[in-house]
Amino acid sequence: MSDRRLTPANGRVAASHLKGQIEADSFTDGEPATIGTVVVDLLATPAGKRDRQLLIGAAVTVYERRDGWAFVQSKRDGYVGYVVESALVAVQSPSHRVATPATHAYATESFKSQDLLYLPFGAELTVVDERHKFFETPQGFVPKKHLRPLSHPFSDPATVAQLFFGVPYLWGGNSTRGIDCSGLVQAAYHACGHLCAGDSDMQKDGLGKLLAADEPLQRGDLVFWKGHIAMMVDGETMIHANAHHMAVVYEGLEQATLRIKAQGDGDVLARRRVL
């Protein structure tokens, strides 16, 4: 059975490459677009529950526009769902990403000018001009120290994850406004230039190599429980977004393992290393 989260089909329309595999009223190649809203929810159904989120600058393929909603697929991780149609803009070619926990776009190249937008880590922008201390973008002037070229990704996923320390927990969240366990891992790997699925079950089956139960853990290793994932920052301490603390926190692996089992979510299911 195909995974709803990754299958661009809703009964009315489906991606052309699915013709002959599923039933739909029509098939289409879709049209490219870009997310123009700072953070938008990607929903399972129109006005339904949030599956994940997309950040400004994200590329999508639009398969249907209907009643103010757009049925889209994220180009980066293949996730499918509905976004409000007003979140879409014409195709853009971002050149930089926000590389600090957050920043602002200003009306002029002065930090005393009006702040126009709050921009979270990972937001992708197109730099159109370089000034003394600011980059000019279509969204406004952004401090140069807060942006990083997409051509120069981070090298250590754990370092990226640590930028999210203290961010509030949000089910299905993907930004420094709010994030969940799999969103944190995905953000870390995307910033390092690696593809990464959006949910922990996919990450457990698709990231890196499986480690033996007695193999010592190291920085960057991933630990999986039922419906949960954490990243090690050293051999004994992990960082994760979790609903127990309602935030991104550091926690000892041994302590977390006992707590998670006590709350009824079982033992560690897998430990993986991404080379």
Image (cartoon, rainbow, N blue to C red):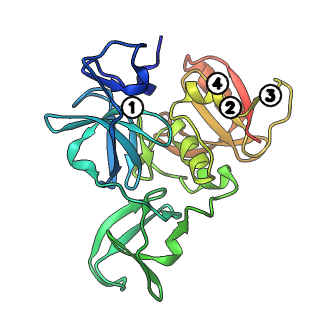
| Mark 2 nearby-residue class (10 Å; few <14, some 14–19, many ≥20) | many
- Per the model, the C-alpha gap separating discs 1 and 2 is 26 Å
First in sequence: mark 1 or mark 3? 1
> Which of the 4 quarters of the picture holds residue 54?
top left
Residue at the spot x=24%, y=17% of the render? 25
Foreground disc of the pair 1, 3: 1
Residue 27 got which mark?
Answer: none
- The residue at which mark 4 appears reads as 205
- The residue at which mark 1 appears reads as 80
First in sequence: mark 2 or mark 4? 4
Left/right placement of residue 5 relative to residue 210 reads left
- The residue at which mark 2 appears reads as 223
- Per the model, the C-alpha gap separating discs 2 and 4 is 12 Å
Left/right placement of residue 2 relative to residue 202 reads left
SS assignment at label 4:
helix
Instruction: Name the residue type under label 3.
Output: Leu
First in sequence: mark 1 or mark 2? 1
**Image location of residue 97, percent across then percent down:** 49, 62
On-image quarter of the C terminus: top right
Residue 170 or residue 192, whichever sits in front = 192
**Image location of residue 114, percent across then percent down:** 26, 78
